[in-house]
Image (cartoon, rainbow, N blue to C red):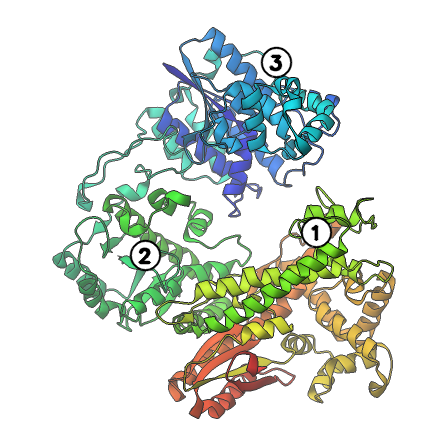
């Protein structure tokens, strides 16, 4: 039986757009190409692995407001957001690719792609009785078309999609002919089609299955009781319209002959296609096109003999043969690269001998998980140069060397200080290998850090993302090997036929990336890389291994107290509301606050997509409005804060306590921000509230080991001091040099008032501008902070800039640099690319200018604390080896020290932090000692 593949074009465009978020652009025109790349990759894979007899793509020609359905209901799809700005131009390029590959494109005005697909299916059923049809989509509307010859496929999972899948009605067996009635009954929020109130997918399916149709429901309406009957009767007229809107139109007139969709790669114009791909920067596709055109492309490529991997039968193909990377693609170049498997002591000894003669090697570990403190080592891969790679498994289904043997053999090269080691996110490997009993010594290089320093505006720094964006190389995806979701396994279960190419490719690509980035690390960038960021890698690895002790009993005590208060708040909210509602539902809260009776009828402040906003900003305005009598906004604010505390902090901290150490081993990450500041994860310790009483209580659970004590030091107004240094503003410099209350001093200047007569309100206003100026605060932002008019806020900003002309000049210089160079630099010459600095859209350009200013000041403060961390770590190792730097929380460093050394460690900490850089203003660090983190404040 011949097969026709029908691709739901726009569904796949959007999937490709959001699947590849790594910035990609044409080398010829500079236009974005990430979506085109993803879509093209899907097409070529489909042609290679499925070899369809016929293939067509159906697209939407009409806009959301231009189809016949909007004539029936003007609100149809009225709630849809426009696509991203760079989406439309990439659709045009995708259509060029389709034309070059001679794939017909179908689409008609006034109707939608689903209607064209429905018509095409209807015609083929009639005209081609021996033809099987496969629709590449997960659109629930298209499940109406399923029968014994027509299948719907989820391209992501490579599996058949049934009505039960989309309606989440397992085992009900919803037949396709009932789909339209179910859709009408439940409604469709994405298309703005209203359904019957209170009826979701499962209820709709149950009712239609029971009564046979919508008409059958109303014929038996008296058998339905209560609120459901009432809602069905209320929605009866609207239901008629909804039923029309969800029904696919299958009589669209358009010219199409099955022969038009004949798929024959041998008829391609290879030169034309290669030229198109070259212009787009897709260097890996021309060879694939040649193989397809010559008929030599295959779903399986035999492994080279010299790899000597265990034999394995071909994987059972999925319906789409892994259209979106489902299951290992053994035609991938890594399977044919000649990588080596090290599974005997003789081979291992030979590898070690080769490595001992090298000056630099690439190293990577494979493990059972992402957390290096809990993951088990599955193997180590090593490369001595581009194109080289070998994998030494220590845990796998087949025979392998014992981990102890591998570690002891590799120890002499891993701990050899004369051999440099390259990794991609080598901090992870440092932790894993130290836990396995070996410390990597010698110079370190990290291609993740290098990629970030070269361009801190990338959307991602995983090896897959960086290799794709830098080498135009698509690495084997880990999901191909271990799956995802409920079916996900761990790397120790991956057979060596797949594990060896994957692991070896990692170190080979790492070497290739280093060859690309190393020449770009010149001058100041090289200094930043070698003297700040790479030393910090070792510091952060040591911090993760050390962790910090957390008392679970204290967390449980806090949970009990807070949960009791949450229960009280629920009762108070119920009393304050005009009728019962779910306080966790923003939509229901919006109805209570803003709807007329029985709602409270409060005038809305901000409109959301589907209902009036009830975000923090809105609720705070309502709570502070003396004309609004209800206490509901303030109660909800407290309720949200406490529930977030229980769910986000208390729960995650308990779960994060390592069972063997009793400590939380959080990760501090260098590439988590574009400004250079560190971020925290697993768990995020930087998110714990700082100034609130609740935050202080949580910090009380962080305690030192017996006999130890915490020493903490916090930089005082570090960003303002950095601003004074960078701007050279004399008034600000003088205020810091004289040790004045900086906010009071600034208020005195701005409001032309003697410093001892400055009011608390004036100080607060000056403080808001001081901190806001670093972020390029606008009159609108300042007015919200001060609860004043935008005009007054604008005047305060104007007065500030008049009094502190050096700052105003500095801010303008930051913007000028971004305009001229496309990037700005910090005090340590860290660069950040400033996108949209030349945008024609005024709002985008203004945001880019604020980003430029913030990046310089905040990034320079980040440079300062990183230098301090490196220096503190080295001094502690030499002078107090039993003391350990544990955390960096914004501008604060926390050290755990033996009690006997605490005062000396405190003095060291303050001295090192205050001398980390030479600025034109004093650097001040406030330090304290405490028996818990809370006591250090």
Q: According to the image, label 3 marks what residue?
A: 252
- In the rendered image, is residue 899 in sight? yes
Quadrant in the rendering for residue 544: bottom left
Q: Is residue 854 left or right of residue 330?
A: right
Quadrant in the rendering for residue 316: top left
Q: CA distance from mark 3 to mark 1?
A: 42 Å
Q: Is residue 881 or residue 692 the one in the foreground?
A: 692
Q: According to the image, label 1 marks what residue?
A: 844
Q: Is residue 259 above or below residue 152?
A: above
Q: Which mark is residue 234?
A: none
Q: CA distance from mark 2 to mark 1?
A: 43 Å
Q: Is residue 166 or residue 358 the one in the foreground?
A: 166
**Circles 2 and 1: CB atoms closer than 8 Å:** no
Sequence-wise, which precedes: disc 2 or disc 1? 2
Residue lying at 20% horizontally and 62% vertically, measured from the top left = 406
Query: Mark 3 or 1, which is nearer the eye?
Result: 3
Location of the C terminus by quadrant is bottom right
Q: Secondary structure at mark 2?
A: strand
Q: According to the image, label 2 marks what residue?
A: 367
The picture places residue 643, in percent across and down from the top left corner, at 60, 60
Residue lying at 47% horizontally and 58% vertically, measured from the top left = 451
The picture places residue 482, in percent across and down from the top left corner, at 34, 46
Q: Is residue 909 or residue 752 the one in the foreground?
A: 909
């Amino acid at each position: 039986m011949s097969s026709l593949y029908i691709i739901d074009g726009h569904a796949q465009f959007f999937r490709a757009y959001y699947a590849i978020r790594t910035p990609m652009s044409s080398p010829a025109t500079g236009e974005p190409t990430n979506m085109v790349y993803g879509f093209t990759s899907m097409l070529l894979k489909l042609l290679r692995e499925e070899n369809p007899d016929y293939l067509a793509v159906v697209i939407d020609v009409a806009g959301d407001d231009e189809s016949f359905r909007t004539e029936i209901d003007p609100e149809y799809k009225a709630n849809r957001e426009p696509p991203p700005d760079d989406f439309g131009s990439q659709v045009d390029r995708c259509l060029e690719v389709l034309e070059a590959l001679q794939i017909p494109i179908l689409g008609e005005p006034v109707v939608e792609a689903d209607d064209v697909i429905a018509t095409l299916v209807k015609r083929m059923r009639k005209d081609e009785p021996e033809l099987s049809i496969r629709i590449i989509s997960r659109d629930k509307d298209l499940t109406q078309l399923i029968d014994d010859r027509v299948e719907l496929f989820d391209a992501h999972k490579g599996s058949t999609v049934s009505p039960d899948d989309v309606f989440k009605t397992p085992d009900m067996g919803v037949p396709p002919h009932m789909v339209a009635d179910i859709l009408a009954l439940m409604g469709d929020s994405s298309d703005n089609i209203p359904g019957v109130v209170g009826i979701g997918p499962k209820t709709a399916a149950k009712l239609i299955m029971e009564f046979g149709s919508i008409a059958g429901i109303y014929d038996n309406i008296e058998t339905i009781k209560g609120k459901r009957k009432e809602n069905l009767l209320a929605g009866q007229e609207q239901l008629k319209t909804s039923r029309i809107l969800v029904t696919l139109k299958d009589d669209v007139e358009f010219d199409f002959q099955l022969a038009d969709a004949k798929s024959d790669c041998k008829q391609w114009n290879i030169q034309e296609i290669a030229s198109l791909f070259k212009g787009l920067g897709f260097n890996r596709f021309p060879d694939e096109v040649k193989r397809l055109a010559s008929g030599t492309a295959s779903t399986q490529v035999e492994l080279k003999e010299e790899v000597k991997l265990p034999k394995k039968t071909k994987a059972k193909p999925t319906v789409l043969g892994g259209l979106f990377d489902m299951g290992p693609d053994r035609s991938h170049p890594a399977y044919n690269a000649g990588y080596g498997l090290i599974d005997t002591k003789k081979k291992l000894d030979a590898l070690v001998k080769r490595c001992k003669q090298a000056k630099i090697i690439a190293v990577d570990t494979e493990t059972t998980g992402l957390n290096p403190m809990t993951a088990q080592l599955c193997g180590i891969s090593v490369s001595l140069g581009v194109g080289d790679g070998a994998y030494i498994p220590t845990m796998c289904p087949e025979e392998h060397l014992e981990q102890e043997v591998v570690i002891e053999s590799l120890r002499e090269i891993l701990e050899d200080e004369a051999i440099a080691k390259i990794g991609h996110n080598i901090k992870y490997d440092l932790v894993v290998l130290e836990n396995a009993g070996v410390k990597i010594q010698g110079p370190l290089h990290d291609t993740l850090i290098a990629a970030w320093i070269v361009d801190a505006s990338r959307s991602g720094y995983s090896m897959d993302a960086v290799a794709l964006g830098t080498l135009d190389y698509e690495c084997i995806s880990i999901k191909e090997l271990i799956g995802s979701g409920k079916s996900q396994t761990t790397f120790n279960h991956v057979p060596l036929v797949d594990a060896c190419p994957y692991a070896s490719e990692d170190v080979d690509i790492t070497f290739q990336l280093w060859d690309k980035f190393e020449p770009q690390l010149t001058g100041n960038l090289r200094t930043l890389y070698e003297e700040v960021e790479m030393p910090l890698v070792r510091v952060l690895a040591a911090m993760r291994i050390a962790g910090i002790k957390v008392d679970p009993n204290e967390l449980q005590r806090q949970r009990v107290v807070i949960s009791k208060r949450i229960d009280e708040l629920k009762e108070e909210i119920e009393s304050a509301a005009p009728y019962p509602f779910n306080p966790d539902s923003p939509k229901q809260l919006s109805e209570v606050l803003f709807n007329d009776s029985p709602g409270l009828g409060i005038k809305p402040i901000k409109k959301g997509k589907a209902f009036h906003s009830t975000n923090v900003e809105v609720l705070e305005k309502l709570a502070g409005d003396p004309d609004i009598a209800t206490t509901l906004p303030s109660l909800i604010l407290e309720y949200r804060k406490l529930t977030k505390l229980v769910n986000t902090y208390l729960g995650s901290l308990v779960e994060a306590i390592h069972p063997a150490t009793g400590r939380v081993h959080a990760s501090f990450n260098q590439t988590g921000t574009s400004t250079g500041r560190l971020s925290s994860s697993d768990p995020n310790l930087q998110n714990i509230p700082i100034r609130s009483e609740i935050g202080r209580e949580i910090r009380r659970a962080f305690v030192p080991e017996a006999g130890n004590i915490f020493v903490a030091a916090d930089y005082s107004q570090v960003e303002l001091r950095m601003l004074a240094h960078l701007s050279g503003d004399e008034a600000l410099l003088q205020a810091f040099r004289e040790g004045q209350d900086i906010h009071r001093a600034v208020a005195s200047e701005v409001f032309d008032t003697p410093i001892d007569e400055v009011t608390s309100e004036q100080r607060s206003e000056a403080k808001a501008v001081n901190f806001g100026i670093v972020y390029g605060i606008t009159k609108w932002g300042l007015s919200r902070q001060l609860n004043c008019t935008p005009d007054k806020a604008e005047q305060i900003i104007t007065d500030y800039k008049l009094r502190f002309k050096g700052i105003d000049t500095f801010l303008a210089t930051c913007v000028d640099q971004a305009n001229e160079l496309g990037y700005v630099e910090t005090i340590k010459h860290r660069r950040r690319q400033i996108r949209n600095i030349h945008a024609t859209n005024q709002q985008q350009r203004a945001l880019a200018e604020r980003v430029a200013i913030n990046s310089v000041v905040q990034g320079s403060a980040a440079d300062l604390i990183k230098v301090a961390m490196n220096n503190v770590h080295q001094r502690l190792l030499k002078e107090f080896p039993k003391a350990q730097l544990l955390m960096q929380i914004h501008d604060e460093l926390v050290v755990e020290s033996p009690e006997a050394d605490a005062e000396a460690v405190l003095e060291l900490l303050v001295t090192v932090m205050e001398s980390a850089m030479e600025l034109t203003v004093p650097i001040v660090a406030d330090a304290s000692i405490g028996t818990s983190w809370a006591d250090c404040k």
